[in-house]
Amino acid sequence: MAGRKQKDNKVKIFDTTLRDGEQSPGNTMNIQEKLRVARQLEILGVDIIEAGFPIASQGDFDAVKQIAKTIKKSVVAGLARANKKDIDRAWEAIKNARKPRIHTFISTSEIHLKYQLRMTRKEVLKIAVKSVKRAKKYTPNVEFSAMDATRSDRDYLCRVFAEVIDAGATTLNVPDTVGYAVPAEFGELISYLMENVPNISDATISVHCHNDLGLSVANSLAAVANGARQVECTINGIGERAGNASLEEIVMVLRTRKDLFQTDTSILTEKIYPSSRLITSITGVPVQPNKAIVGANAFAHESGIHQDGLLKEKETYEIMTPQSIGMMKSSLIIGKHSGSHAFRKRVEELGYKLTAEELKKAFQRFKDLADKKKEVFDEDIEAIVADEILRAPDVYKLLNLNVVSGTVAIPTATVEIEANGNIIKDVGFGDGPVDAAFKTIAKVTKTKSRLLKYIVNSITGGTDAQGEVTVRLEEDGTVVVGQGAHMDIIMASAFAYVNALNRIEQIKKNLLRGVTTKNGNDNC
Ligand code: KIV
Ligand code: ZN
């Protein structure tokens, strides 16, 4: 793959985990979680963070605004349809960013023009130019996306791009909105744009590929080989339908095959795995074990021949190391005799920054776990840390839980909870131990919430592994995620449930104080 010679050999990484990723089912996040993700993306070294779609809801607006105020190194982009209201709202949300970008878009394909927009090509062109000009009044950093570009007429696309560059767009995005393109064709489209948009040297070509045919990463790379210098992607490939191109795959291909692409990114690859874990623990959506780069089996060599080769020389079967993406193989790193200093160092090496208070609590939990468990792995520490960071302030505190269950016993739970300083105790039954625990907790807290999802993961191997539980609850249209980790799976479940109940309480309190506005889209 010779690739097109470009003066700039750096590929910018535009992360849309908080926009295209977050808007997909099951991946919703609340404002604190979005902030936490944005900070992690900055640590990871992404060039542009697409923080959200400010016009979509008050919650989205608030989150983008907070992220814009917090993030210093990365550009913070706000999405806007090509109209005055959206653009003004996006600017309002990002105006305090050190490096703001307005990202405006309109469809250019015949099929979208005819059925969705009901506009002529001329009208769309006029709106695109007008919108870029409006955005440009606010900031010099303007991105324009031609939605459904891969199904658009090429010469019309060239015309739109040429005119929006003249209007001030500095990045031109070519989305494969419906995941229809195949690599050779998509690469050729980028090449065509490079040759037929006369002022293309005044802008950066970006690509945004969806994964409906499983080709989003391949398409993005074909585009890079043909001159694209910005790639839009998400952590773990989350996003609409089959998802967006996965950040970790694109970055590691460019790093591992630098010989071929002769380009690189500014991503600190050692922060990839912690970033992936963070998204999983916030959304509760697990990564498939055989997923490239961040899947649990991505570096697990099972075959005897491979193991033999690896023992003799790593390069025989390993094209990149788990360390290079920050996945320290599950090794015993620190034990029960380790002090808080070693613990803090390890937490930092894993890519987390904790406040003194969070660190103190996490260290205490680590000590408790190390007392019970033979070996403490990085994954155990990550689970504890994620749990502490994401913990909502306690309205309910689980003091005690005893569950009786078995082949003849009716599953029975005894629960003791501290609620606003009062200690409440009760007993309840269920169809199994987790059901009994949840029903009794629900009785004690009088929650009106509904359980939408319950996910259990074993953090490491072995029967003494910690279980990591994620629950998703809904109350009056508000959806929250709660997490819990414990060696006892029933305890982990109860902690996750109580954690989610605390989040609901936190949201109710914020609503009363007018901190955030609840609506359909801002579900946490
Ligand atoms: O998929 C798409 O076309 C988009 C645009 C808003 C860039 O997400
Ligand atoms: Zn998209």
Image (cartoon, rainbow, N blue to C red):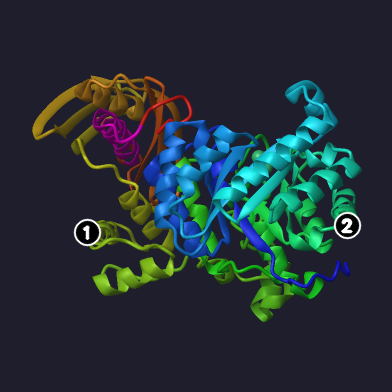
Q: Quadrant of the N terminus?
A: bottom right
Pick out the residue farthest to the bottom.
312
Judged from the image, the secondary structure of the residue bearing numbered disc 2 is helix
Residue 376 appears left or right of 412: right
Q: Residues within 10 Å of mark 1 (few under 14, many from 20)?
A: few
Residue sitting at x 34%, y 22%: 449
Pick whichever, 17 or 455, lies toward us.
17
**Label 1 near label 2: C-beta < 8 Å?**
no
- Residue 256 visible to the viewer: yes
Q: Which numbered tag is attached to residue 357?
A: 1
Residue sitting at x 27%, y 23%: 442
Pick whichever, 481 or 409, lies toward us.
481
Residue under numbered circle 2:
191
Q: Residues within 10 Å of mark 2 (few under 14, many from 20)?
A: some
**Residue 298 sits in quarter:** bottom right
* Horizontal and vertical percent position of residue 450: 38, 21
Pick whichever, 122 or 106, lies toward us.
122
Give the alpha-carbon distance from disc 2 to disc 1, as whole Å: 53 Å
Does residue 404 lie above or below 186 as drawn? above
Residue sitting at x 43%, y 50%: 67
Viewer-side label of 2, 1 = 2
Q: Give the amino acid at mark 2.
A: Ser
Residue 522 appears left or right of 173: left
- Residue 243 visible to the viewer: no
Please provide the residue range marked out in magenta.
492-516
* Magenta-colored stretch includes residue 500: yes
* Horizontal and vertical percent position of residue 521: 48, 29
Q: Quadrant of ligand 1?
A: top right
